Image (cartoon, rainbow, N blue to C red):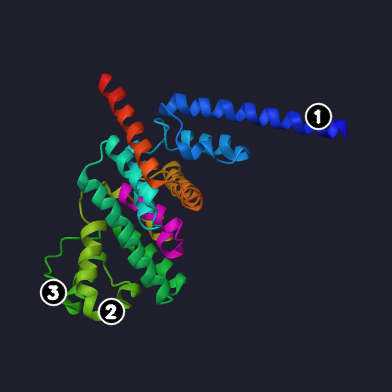
Amino acid sequence: MKRVLMLALTLLASSARADEATLADVENTLGQVPTFLRSFPSEALESAWGDMKALELNPKTALPGKVKELIGLAVAAQIPCRYCIYFHTQAAKLNGATSDELGEALLAASQTRRWSTVLNGNQIDEAQFRAEFAKIVENARAGKVKPNTGVKVVDAASAITDIEGTLGFVPGFFKSYPEVALAPAWKGFKGLWLSQTQVAPKYKELIGLAVASQIPCRFCIVAHTELARLNGATDTEIEEAVGMAAATRFWSTYLNGSMTDEATFKKETDQIVSRFRKATAKK
């Protein structure tokens, strides 16, 4: 009995020392220990903080800090998680994101949600979708995807003409969209995904992939992965985008489930961001 008790006390002491070391590292990194981390389960604190530090806060990842935060914002916006929306917005701005880039990240999340709903709700055949998307990628590599067709899209008929002229054919999932709204839906799709905007094409696709991966939507995962690669994304960048989606879901679940005080969370986020901004200004 004494051995069991001694072992339990040893484990508790070891856990306490690990927590103290982790919280000290948090304070050293962020300048303070956020309230929600002080009540985090001790058995998982070290790994949770380690994951955040290794991916999101690491300046040496394949993805730039700004892109990681835009991914976090896009995922958070459609969970939705008010804590994560606030944090990733402020962190994205700290990393140089403009209002236009923030808006595009949110639009990419919205568009991914829209088409995920259409594809799943209309029970599109997955094999057919994969074949059609492979054809889109093949046409793009061959230079047959031409966004500037000169077609004025005003109704379903002109939208179909423009889709065919742009992609080289009309994928079946577009035909499943309500005919009365196809023209504006296509213009919105084309305006974001097939146009030069503030966020680079590769990063828009990685944002779409991150959102799709945790909806989850198999159709959108396939599409955004292939298009991200088409635009130059590496396997590491793809893995980091999915990792950021997973991390955002992780913290959203904990923050909401523990009913973290929102005012305190925002105040501490502002303090951390302000400290990083001042430190950057001094360099």
Secondary structure type for disc 3:
loop
Question: Is 122 placed above or below 142 here?
Answer: below
Going from N to C along the chain, the mark reached first, 1 or 3, is: 1
Residue 64 in view in this figure: no
Q: Quadrant of residue 195?
A: bottom left
Residue type at mark 1 is: Met
Q: Which mark is residue 105?
A: none
The residue at the point 87 percent across, 31 percent down is 2
> Which is the main secondary structure of the residues drawn in magenta?
helix
Image quadrant containing the C terminus: top left
Question: Is 119 placed above or below 205 here?
Answer: below
Going from N to C along the chain, the mark reached first, 1 or 2, is: 1
Residue 21, how many percent across, how many down?
A: 57, 25
Q: Which residue is mark 1?
A: 6
Residue type at mark 2 is: Pro
Specify start and end residues of the magenta stretch as a single range.
203-221
Q: Is residue 186 left or right of residue 11?
A: left
How many numbered callouts? 3
Asked whether 108 or 83 is in front, the reply is: 83
Residue 278 in view in this figure: yes
Q: Which residue is mark 2?
A: 178
Residue type at mark 3 is: Val
Q: Which residue is mark 3?
A: 154
The label nearer to you, 1 versus 2, is 1
Residue 223, how many percent across, how many down?
A: 38, 60
Q: Is residue 104 left or right of residue 206?
A: left
Circle 2 Cα neighbour tier, 10 Å, few/some/many (<14 / 14–19 / ≥20): few
Q: CA distance from mark 1 to mark 3?
A: 78 Å
Residue 106, how many percent across, how many down?
A: 29, 54
Q: CA distance from mark 2 to mark 3?
A: 15 Å
Image quadrant containing the N terminus: top right
Question: Is 65 placed above or below 121 here?
Answer: above
